[in-house]
Amino acid sequence: MMPFLPRSRRLLSIALSVFICAVIAACSTDIPNSTLNPNSQFGRDIDRLFDWLLLGGAIVFTIVEVGVLFTIILFRRRGGKGGKPRQVYGNATLEITWTLIPAAVLAFIAVPTVRTIFKYRPENVPADALQVQVIGHQWWWEFRYPELGVVTANELVLPVGRTANFALTSKDVIHSFWIPSMAGKRDVIANRTNHIYFKPDSAYAWNGFCAEFCGTSHANMRFKVFTVSPAAFDAWVAHQKTGPRFGDGPDSSVAGAGNVGAVAAPLTLAGFTNGKRPAHLVPSTPIPKGLAIANVTGDATRGAQLYKTGACIACHVVQGVSPGIVGPNLTHFGSRTTLASALYPNDPRHLALWIKDAPAMKPGSLMPALGRSARTPAGYTDQQVADIAAYLLALK
Ligand code: CUA
């Protein structure tokens, strides 16, 4: 069709398509990953800088383009008059002008930018800020709340209306901590502590990302952020401070089985209608081709025995059960919404496949394939894998 349309109509139809796409894209209201939809004062301050730069850029662009068009039309070659135009070499006035104007523009940009940078210096953290240590690992996030004695992984919970002050460091390479809807990016570097702080001002759930290329699974190094009411945050902390809920052996002596029932449920995601999570909270990473499991219905008690006597305990912490120091803390794993650094939903099938063959699920994963296969004939059977998954999911 297109080639037979007259040129003007083709241009018009392209312009119309672009316009319609732009209008449709603007209709989206659920934009949790956008820096243009900030949900903290820090985010808004950065957004305002962006708006000023965009406005300034638009003004400069307009002046330059009008000048170019004006020159092209006014000084175009007219019929009859041939020959070269006058050649100009070196013009001090012009050169000083085109040095001074950009310098003035840069100074105009620098003032609000530097003021914003100074406003968020580490010295300006409010005294009552919540301290959070962020530790980057290839390829997952560790979150520690040192004042509260809480350690978790890949899911960050923050109270609305209270500044959270993050101390960022890395166990290996350089990562970058980024929650687009909250604040700017900040590098996460080994042997150095960087800081960033902001105060979330609405209760919702957001996505976080690693924004610095850090190896094979850089793009798979994500996390979730839940901003909740102060009361919900206190309840979450109280729950996190207890041991795992599962079982009636040594687990529960650490858990203090008597008082576990008294604290609130793991984390109530209030604010989502009917408890239904918005689409952006549910990862949709496809399961790798060729990876399957015969059975995903496991027995948690058998799984607990396998966990305690198996390879898991060398790497993972389950409070009172295993003291591992390499992998994510699994004490309340069952209460998390995602697994493998927010790559998959935390359900029996994805978890069992993860245990069976983590490197297939996340390329480069330090966790080895634990399930039985041609490559790992001594690994766990599918049933054993399902049992371990059932145990971990029971750790609310
Ligand atoms: Cu960590 Cu990219």
Image (cartoon, grey):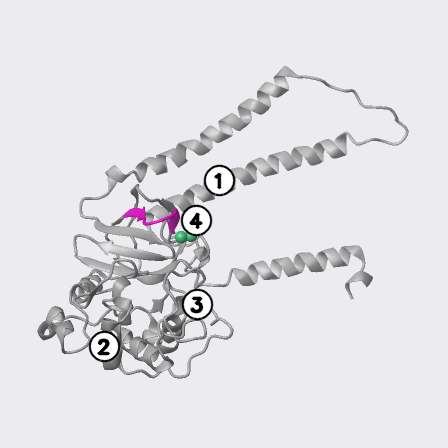
**Which quadrant of the view contains residue 109?**
top left
Give the main secondary structure, helix, strand or loop, of the magenta stretch.
strand
Indicate whether 245 appears above or below 201.
below
Going from N to C along the chain, the mark reached first, 1 or 3, is 1
Q: Nearer the viewer, residue 275 or 240?
A: 240
Residue 287 in the image, given as x and y percentages of width and height? 47, 72
3 vs 2, front mark: 2
Helix, strand or loop at label 3? It is helix
Can you identify the residue that label 3 sits on? Answer: 361
| Residue at (83% x, 23% y) in the render | 84
Q: For this view, does 88 lie left or right of residue 181?
A: right
1 vs 3, front mark: 3
What is the span of residues highlighted in magenta in the rendered image? 167-177
Cα distance between the residues tagged 3 and 2: 25 Å
Helix, strand or loop at label 1? It is helix
Q: Residue furthest front?
A: 378
